[in-house]
Image (spheres, rainbow, N blue to C red):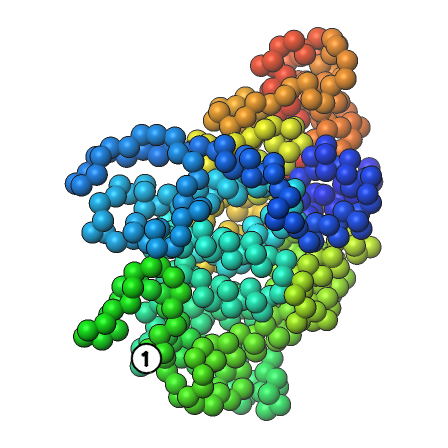
Amino acid sequence: MAIAREIVVLNKFTFGPSPQAVAEIRRRGVEAWLAEQLRPDETADPRAEAAMAQTRIRIRYAAGEGYAAVDELRGLDTLAMPPEQLWRFVDSRNPFGGPERARARVDVAAATVVRAVHSRWQIRELLCDFWHNHFNVNATDAGIAAGLPDHDRTIRSHALGNFRALLEAIAQSPSMLVYLNNRSSRAGAPNENFARELLELHTLGRNNYLNALYNRWREVPGAGEGRPQGYIDEDVYEAARAFTGWSIEDGAGLSANERLPATGRFRYVDAWHDPYQKRVLAAEFEPFREPQADGRKVLDILASHPGTAQFVCTKLVRRLVADEPPQSLIDAAVAAWRENLTAPDQIAQVIRSIALHRDLASTAGRKLKRPLELLASFARAAEIDLRPTDGLLNELDAGGQRLFGWPPPTGHPDDPAYWLSSNALRRRLSLLLGLAENWWAAGTLPTRAALDGTPVRAGDAVRAWQRRLLGHGEAPDRRAAVLAGMNVSADEAIDRDEGRMRRLVAYVAMSPEFQMR
């Protein structure tokens, strides 16, 4: 069965169609809806803001030396704290329970769930999820968690903007500087971690790592003309030197009599920078340039390199559209990327080129939902007025998607095999049943939301919820499977039994069609 164009767009570029979103995109048309989504208005998201203000997450820990036991429901307080206030939790000399030191990660995760379900600006929310994985940090560490609210604001403010601007903002993110060890990178002892991941994961990609073929920069194809096809270890080493001195205010000593303040904010320390000449991707760097100029030149080179356009656009299309998307979609995205290199809305133009492409329709139902997408799409379609709880966040963790807690810098795998392991599959089905039956006190399912008349027979209820969740009610085999699973006949009245109705809705959502985007 052909799926309407607007439903395909909603499935690919939002956290799932809601009745309100479907009505709006049909009323306004895909182009007008898309144009508004690509220019989100920060002042016009009252539903998400109200839901965040009402969210309470439990924090619990025993008493310790210098602090009392805590067991309370608390709002998302750390989101509004300045870096100086959050950096207190990093210093082990300050008496705090362990959960206090990691609380910022929990708050940002809860806010992410709220926005995925309730935000009007769905394309931005989906892009924030993409960029958080692309520029992954593991905020289970207190030093990284302290900067996570700022890291999240950075990604949110640049999610649909210019990639070069986003790249520099990430390079100055305290969470990233702690995570990839650049805060301690100094002349004479540069740390390569950030530079290597900058090239391998954030820009050129591993496919453009050519060290197995070439040992010297002049040997790389195109290097003689100043346009090397890829990078080698020499480029990593030199890029690491370029970013020496990009640090944070963490109280470290500058001299025998001077220390950095302990604010947790970005700080360029010129005394720690290697000022001498460098060569990155065949580009010569003059010595003793102005502060931060070396690092910024590296970012300029990487952001404009054709390999970056190819790598990031391919990753973006695969993440949003399909594991094996039409090459035409990748080509269109790359073209839009390169045509808008300096445009302030470069990323938005790339998304537009994908969303309006004629070949998008052929990709319907070809991308597996991750647990967050499954949760949000179910809540949105079923009109659950959801507020995340600690139990719900723990269930996401158990399902394999620990928001802002993935240890390696790669971010969560974009591989269906990871999300369909036996444990992950069991968890994704229990997630739906738990949402329907409100196991985690996150919100009540309105079981009659998709129904028109009373009394309602079981067969009609399944068909109605298929229309709501799958976009059509023409799935008799799936309908029969739901009825058999519930041990109920199609003619049996069911709408008066809330418990059975909740299970019915969950079973419909367990259909393979709802698991895919």
What's the amino acid at mark 1? Ala
User: Does 349 sit above or below residue 491?
Assistant: below
Is residue 178 toward the left or the right of residue 29 in the image?
Answer: left
Quarter holding residue 394 = top left
Q: Is residue 178 above or below residue 467?
A: below
Which residue is located at x 60 percent, y 13 percent? 498
Q: Toward the viewer: 28 or 276?
A: 28
* Residue 475 in sight from this viewpoint: no
Residue extending farthest to the front is 43
Residue 108 in view here: yes
Give the quadrant of the C terminus: top right
The residue lying furthest to the left in this view is: 65
Q: Picture coordinates of residue 83 (x, y %)? A: 38, 55
Which residue is rendered at x = 79% and y = 49% of the image? 32
From the top left corner, tell me how far across and down residue 379 is, in percent: 61, 32
Residue density around tag 1, few if under 14, some if 14–19, many if 20 or more, within 10 Å: few
Which is more toward the observer, 210 or 339?
Answer: 339
Q: Residue at label 1?
A: 271
- Could you tell whether 426 is left or right of 38 in the image? left
Location of the N terminus by quadrant is top right
Front-lying residue, 77 or 4: 77
Helix, strand, or loop for circle 1? helix
